[in-house]
Amino acid sequence: MAKEVVVTREGYDKLVHDLDELRTVKRKEVADKIKVARGYGDLSENAEYDAAKEEQAVVEARKEGIATPILVGHVAEIEEMLRKAGEDPVAYEIIAGDTDQDCATKAVALCAEGKANFLMKGILGTADLMRAVFNKEHGLRTSHLTTHCMFYEIPALGRMLILTDGGVNTFPDLDKKAEILENAAMVLQALGYEHINASCVCGAEQVNPKVQSTVDADALSKMTDRWAKYNMDVCGPVALDLAVSVEACHHKHYNAPGAGMADILLVPNYEVGNGIGKAAGLFGHAKNAGIILGAKVPIVLVSRSDSAYSKLASIAAGSVLAERMNLA
């Protein structure tokens, strides 16, 4: 399954090769090295279906040699889930946790102490996990802005792109948008992209002083010095069609560098991002993976309604980025 967790363009061959190595040549070496701390929380409240998908992804990641999970939560429940998945609980490291808050704190501590390389949210509240991450004394806070990147492989486009930020920053200002965009660029650079196209998505391609998102997009497109080290072209403001469709650009006579071929979609707020992302999955049959950046380690964060494949893909992305990105 690791071969399905791919990027297109310059990063495609390199990431496929790396994931093949995770499964074969370096399987034991890398699995021992890359550990994911996983906060389970309470599995007792109508969460069996969600928990089964979570467990399936974790078990598959271990079998494929992508990551060695450290499971944090109610030991008896975790062991029972592993047995139902055909696994021997003795083969897994399980750390006892009580409440959701306790599980989150213990999982974060594993990463802070260097015992795990990235963090994955299990069946517990996102707020509980992020409170532990942002704890000033024991958390994983850095000076960087925390941002959310969703990878989407959309059949109609025939390529992968990153959508950001549809999960963490609700209504970012210009400075935060620049940091959100830079985090996404660093991800693609880490995955081997030698050139990146980014589009600042708005309602239209005209700058309107009364619509702040278009003003911000125009400003971002002019920060060429900032984007030079990523070899990234940023266009905006653009409507979604001009961001992803070369044909639409031809029809509208829009010819900014990278237009129609976005690798990154920067959205003006989380409502737009969440809407585009859900539509890509529900109507466009897109495969997806999700990562939070800005902490000391990558954080795997996907929706509870996402498939086991999405969770496995997110684990694979977390393991690769944990190795390649300097996040401290």
Image (cartoon, rainbow, N blue to C red):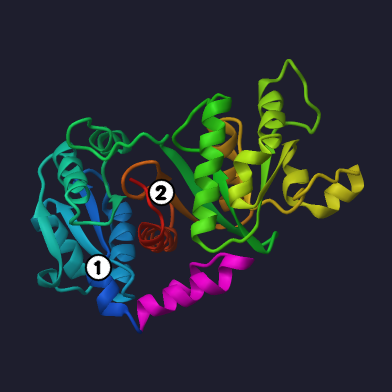
Residue at 78% across / 52% down in the picture? Answer: 245
Which span is picked out in magenta?
1-24
Looking at the image, residue 294 sits to the left or right of residue 178; the answer is left
Residue at position x 49%, y 28% from top?
170
Quadrant of residue 138 within the rendered picture = top left
SS for callout 1:
helix
Residue 15: x, y in percent?
Answer: 50, 70
Q: Is residue 22 magenta?
A: yes
Which of the two residues, 228 or 262, is positioned nearer the viewer here?
Answer: 228
**At 32% across and 52% down in the image, what residue appears?**
50
Instruction: Give the image location of residue 83, x and y in percent.
Output: 17, 69
Q: Earlier in the sequence, mark 1 or mark 2?
A: 1
The local crowd at label 1, few if under 14, some if 14 to 19, many if 20 or more residues have their Cα within 10 Å, is some
In the rendered image, the vertical position of residue 16 relative to residue 180, given as above or below: below
- Regarding residue 105, the answer to whether it shows in the image is yes
Look at the image and tell me whether residue 282 can be seen: no
Name the amino acid, label 2.
Val
The single residue placed furthest to the top in the displayed view is 210
User: Can you say whether 282 is above or below 126 in the image?
Assistant: below
- Main secondary structure of the magenta stretch: helix
Mark whose residue sits in front, 1 or 2? 1
Q: Is residue 319 above or below residue 96?
A: below
Location of the C terminus by quadrant is: top left
Q: Residue at x 36, y 75 (%)?
A: 22
Residue 87, position in %: x, y? Answer: 19, 73
Mark 2 surroundings within 10 Å by alpha-carbon count, few (fewer than 14), some (14 through 19), many (20 or more): many
Label disc, if present, on residue 302 of the rendered structure: 2
List the residue tagged with mark 1. Answer: 33
Q: Amino acid at mark 1?
A: Lys
Distance between the Cα atoms at labels 1 and 2?
A: 24 Å
Place residue 209 in its image quadrant: top right
Asked if residue 229 is among those painted magenta in the image, a careful observer would answer no
